[in-house]
Amino acid sequence: MAESWIIKYEPKSEAEVIGQEKALEQLNLFIQNYKMQKKKAAFLYGPSGCGKTILVKALAKKHNLELIEVNASDYRTKEQIEEKVGNAIKQYSLFGTGKLILIDEIDGLSGVKDRGALTTIAELMQSSKFPIVCTASDPYDQKFSSFRSKTLLIECSPPSADAIFKTLKSICEKEKISYDEIALKGLARRCGGDVRATINDLQGLASQGKITKEVLEELSERTQLESMPRALVKVFKNSDPVIALSAFDQVNEDTDQIFLWMSENLPKEYADKDLARAYEQLSRADVFRGRITRWQHWRFLSYINAFLTAGIATAKDKKNAAFVKYVPTMRLLKIWQANMKYQKRKSIAGKVAQKTHASLHESIQSTVPLLKSLFKTSPQKTKQLITAEFDLDDDEVGWLEK
């Protein structure tokens, strides 16, 4: 399985982080002057894929700090937070260095299950010997009203299209991928500042050969084939239920199609216990789909979406770092091919039934198989006579000859 370019080309130093000069400067000062800071945690916020986590990793390396990374979506209760973060802030590094504690995706904390988690984080911040950085997409969410005042807010803005273009160009040159500069700039512009999603798109396009305007235009025209893989990234490559819940909001596919995409690509991303838990969420969604079909209770659609997105996103213990090319299911194509095959057989049987005064069922069961045998073994003249007698067209003759 090909290595994901998101992992392969992850910035390793401060200089490689694009478009976040101001955020880098602010976070740098926070880490350097931590002991003198009144606020003991930084709250790094910005849209998905803009580089929040990468920025923290780069500065941990710069300051020679051991990075303790905690995903809030994986440690959701007061007890789990106390155990994971509490132990980290009390103990010095085994390597004699300081620590930088990253609590990632805290906007994933919500609901009854997470009650007390944000309060616990706020309490731990006050007694921490080491700098703490929390990340989220929207710090102005109501649930952060009291938490926000205890932290230093630092904004990560979406990188400019020009900065993203330079990154894409560098990757193409390293991978020896031919590209049209206009097409590459177009790809950089259309991502809305989501560097992670753009690199994922680039890897998918690179598998088709040279990146040209035509390839990019074709990708833009296939809106539903473009949006479904990107939506699946939000579910499969993410553990935040809040982000996952909106994955299919802009997708031009009905619920049945989403089920097919999920069932086709799920085994490529998950394995073992993760896969079993994910299939359990998929089956629960299917139960509610059955209830809609049976009782027409359309309010159950929200439950289906929750299981298909947040349920599957949180079913995994660890994200799959490998690049996976998401493809539509072949099941629909096979069904269509089978239907086409049956329709030709039915069409031939109808003509035979009319000429022989037999039933359609009898013609399908007995006469059509006989005709297929004749077309395989008889000379051309016999085939022509049968074709003329039953008024068969070229497609029907071709089906009998196969």
Image (cartoon, rainbow, N blue to C red):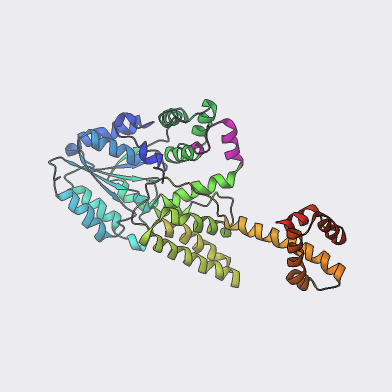
What residue is at 43 percent from the left and 58 percent from the top?
A: 312
x and y, in percent, of residue 124 in the image: 21, 51
How many numbered circles are shown? 0
Q: In the shown orientation, is residue 1 left or right of residue 357?
A: left
x and y, in percent, of residue 355 in the image: 87, 67
Q: In the shown orientation, is residue 278 left or right of residue 256?
A: left
x and y, in percent, of residue 101 in the image: 24, 45
Q: Quadrant of residue 255?
A: bottom right
* Range of residues picked out in magenta: 205-221
In the picture as drawn, the residue positioned furthest to the top comes out as: 181
Residue 214 highlighted magenta (yes or no):
yes
Q: Is residue 231 above or below residue 171?
A: below
Q: In the shown orientation, is residue 278 left or right of residue 68?
A: right
x and y, in percent, of residue 228 in the image: 53, 49
Q: Is residue 67 above or below residue 256?
A: above
Give the overall secondary structure of the magenta segment.
helix
Q: Nearer the viewer, residue 360 or 366?
A: 366
Residue 155 highlighted magenta (yes or no):
no
What residue is at 48 percent from the left and 37 percent from the top?
A: 202
What residue is at 47 percent from the left and 63 percent from the top?
A: 282
Q: Nearer the viewer, residue 322 or 360?
A: 360
Q: Nearer the viewer, residue 292 or 372?
A: 372
Q: Nearer the viewer, residue 343 or 53?
A: 343
